[in-house]
Image (cartoon, helix red, strand yellow):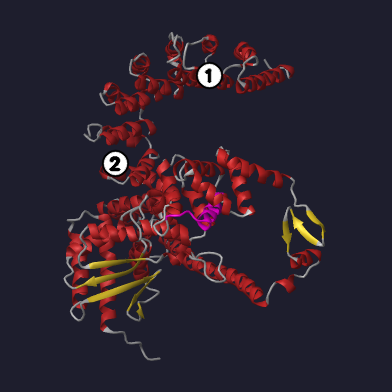
Amino acid sequence: MDEVKFPSDVRLLSEAVIELNISRKNVELYPPDHPIIKDSIDRALDHLKNLLKSRSAITLGIAKNMLVIDDYTLDKKNPVFQDFALSLYGKGIAAITFYSGLDVKDLIVLHELIIMQEGHIGDALVQLAETKNLKHIKLSPLDLSVFEFKDGLLRLGVLESKLLEDYVYGLLEGRLAYNDAENLVHKVPPEQIASLINSQMPEDAPGEAYDKVISAYFKRKSTSVLSREIFERFLVFLENLKTELKTQFLSRTLSHHFSEDEFERVMAELTDEDLRKLLEIFEISSVTIPVSLKNLLDKLSETTAKGEFVFDTTTKGKAFVDDIEIDKGIIKLLEEDHFRTFVSEEYQKELDMMIQGVEAEENQLTETLIHDSGERVIDKALSEVILELLESDSINNEDYLKLVTELSELVDGFLATGRFQELCDVYNTIYSYSLSGKFKVEASGMVKYFFRSEQFIRRLIGAFKFLGKYDTEGAVRLAKVLRLYIISHLLDAFTEEANPNIRKFLIYLLSNMGVDVAHEAVKRLNDKRLDNVISMIALIKECGGKDYVKHVRPFAKDKNRRISMEAIKTLLHFGDREGLSYLRVYLRSNDSDLREQAMLLSGTYKVKDAVPYLIEILEKKDILGTESYSKIPAIKALAQIGDPQAIEPLKKLYRSKGLFFSSARNELKLEIFKSLKYYPVYAIRPLLELGIQSKDTEIRSISMKLLKEIHSRENMGYE
C-alpha cells in the first residue's frame, strides 16, 4: 500500500500541536517566567510562524478528541493530539484560528485560558479572550446542538456527557455567556439537566445559583413573553429534581421570577397533565400554593383524587370524559387491541430506529470505555510486572537499570494523568526494595533522586491541584506516604492559591496528613493574609496539634473576630482552660454577634462550664419581649450540652410574658420544646405537662409524643 502523503501544512501543524501541548502542560506547572515555559513556547511559535509564511491564517478544528486541518484529520491514535483536542473541547471550543503576527504573548494567554480550573466555557471563554487582548488567535465556541438527541439515540456519548456536566457547572456558577445559558436549557433535555444538578448542586448553594438556572429558562432574549412550551420544559426539569431542590427552585421561581398575572396566563394554557404535574410538585415540595392558583389546582385535585376518569356513554352513543367528547377511533382502540391499526408503518419504523439507536449507543459507549480503561489496565499491569522483575534474583545490574528506566516512564504517565493510587503502589514497592535485597542501592537511588526530587514534588503538587479531585482517595494515600517531603510545598501552594476550589481540596489533603502538618502550620501563623492565618489555626486543630496550643492562645484575643473565634474553637477542641476563659468573657459581651458565636461554640463543643452563663442569658429580664430571638441560640446550645440544670430556667422562660413581640416569644417557646428531647427524660416531665396544655398545636404535639415515649420506657422497666 502506498504511503499517504500529507501536505506540508499538515506536517508543520502536527509538530506545532505537539509543542503547544507540551507548553500548555508547562504553563500549568511552572511560573510564567520559568525558562522551561519559554523554551516550549518558542518552539511552538517557530512551527506556527513557518506555517503562516504560506497563508495568512490557519484554522484547527476540534472534533471531540480529534484535530482537523482543512480536509485532513491528524493521527487519531496519537495521544498528544487527543490530549490537546480534549483540552479545547472541554472548554467548549470548536475551532482555533492562528493569524499572521502571532507572538509569545498570544500563546501564553491562550494556555492560561485553557488551563483555567472551573473557568469560563464556550461563548464566555471567547468573550474573556477578547478582554485579555488576544490579538492573533481566534477561538470559535462549540455549537450547543451537540447536546441535542439525534434520531434513534436516547443518550449522549461519553465526551458529550462530560462536556454537558461542565456546562451545567458553568450555568450554576455564572461562567456561561447569556446565549450559552439560554441555548443549554433550550436544547438539552430537561431530565438530563435535572440529573446533573441533582448530583452537582451543593446543599449550601446560594440563592444566586438557583436564580441563574431559572433565569436561563425564563429570561430569554428571543422572547419577552413566557410561553407554554418553555414552562412545560421547566415543569419536566422540576419533576426530575430531588425533593429538597424542588422546594428551593419552586420557591424562588414564585417569589423572584414571575408576576401573578403572567403565571396565571400560562396556567390557563397548560394541559391537564401539566397541571397534574404542577400540583404533585407543589405537594412533594411543601411550597405554599399562591392564592390566585389555589382554586384552579383544587378543582384539578378533586378530579385526580378519584384515581380514575368516569366515562359517560349515554349521550347519543358518544363517549365523554367530564364534558369532553372522545373520538370514535379512541373508543375502538380502548375496546380491543388494534395497535397496528392506529400506529402507522412510518411511526413503527421510527420506534424501531430508536431501539436500535439505544443498542448502537451502548455498543459505542462500551467500546469507548474498553479503550480508555484498557490502556489504564495495561499500564498498571505492566508496572506490576516490572516491579516483580525488579525483585527477581535472575536479573543483572544492567537489566535492573533498564527496568527502572521503563518504570520511570510509566510513573511519569501516572503523574501526568493523576493516577495517584498507582503512584503510591509503585513508591511503596520501590521503597521496600530500598531497605533490603540485591539492588537496594539502586532502589534507594530511585526513591531519593526521582520520587523525592524537587522536580517530581513540584509536578506532584500541580497534579494534586488540578487532578486530585478525580482520585481523592489515591491522592490522600500518596500524600500521607510522602508527607515529610511535600508538606511544606503543599502549604506553600495552598497559601499562594487563589482558586477557592483548589484551596478547599488542598486543605482537605493537608488535614488528612497528621500532626506533622501542624508543626509546619505553626511556622506560617505570622502570614499577613487573614484567610491563611485562619486556615493554619484550623489545620493545627484538624491535624491533632495539641502540643502547639501555646502558639494559638495569643490569637484568641486578636482584634479580627474570625481569627479570634477560630483560635477559641481550636483551644476548646483540645480542652484548653484558656479557651474556656475567653468563652466566658464573650458570653457576657455586649456585642450580640460575638455573644451568639460564643453560644454556638459552647454547644458545638458541649462546654459544661458554659452552662451557668447560658442560663444567665435566659434569665435576663425582658419585659417588652425584645430579647426573645437573642435567647434562642442559648436554648440550642444548652440542648447540645444536655445539662438538666437548664430545665428549671427553661420552665420559667416558657411561663414568662412580655408586652410586645408575641410572635418572637411564641417562636422561642416552640424552640424550648424542640430542645427537650436532648435532656434526660426524668428532668423534662414538668415542662411536658405544661406543654400538653398549650394553645400551640406543635408544642402540644411534641409534648404528647415525648410523654408517650417516657411512658413506654417506664412500662419496659427503664428509668
**Distance (Cα) linking label 1 and label 2:** 49 Å
* On screen, residue 622 above or below 234: above
Q: Which residue is mark 2?
A: 491
Work out whether residue 298 or residue 415 is closer to the camera in this orientation and state it. Answer: 298
Q: Amino acid at mark 1?
A: Asn
Start and end of the magenta stretch?
224-238
Residue 237 in magenta stretch: yes
Please provide percent x and percent y for residue 192.
52, 57
Q: Amino acid at mark 2?
A: Leu
Work out whether residue 582 or residue 349 is closer to the camera in this orientation and state it. Answer: 349
Work out whether residue 520 or residue 349 is closer to the camera in this orientation and state it. Answer: 349
Residue 551 in magenta stretch: no
The residue under the point 35% across, 54% down is: 440
Quarter of the rendering containing residue 183:
bottom left
Quarter of the rendering containing residue 26:
bottom left
* Magenta-colored segment: predominant secondary structure: helix
* On screen, residue 627 above or below 301: above
Quadrant assignment for the C terminus:
top right
Q: Which residue is mark 1?
A: 666
Query: Of the residues tagged 1 and 2, which is closer to the observer?
Result: 1
* On screen, residue 349 above or below 642: below
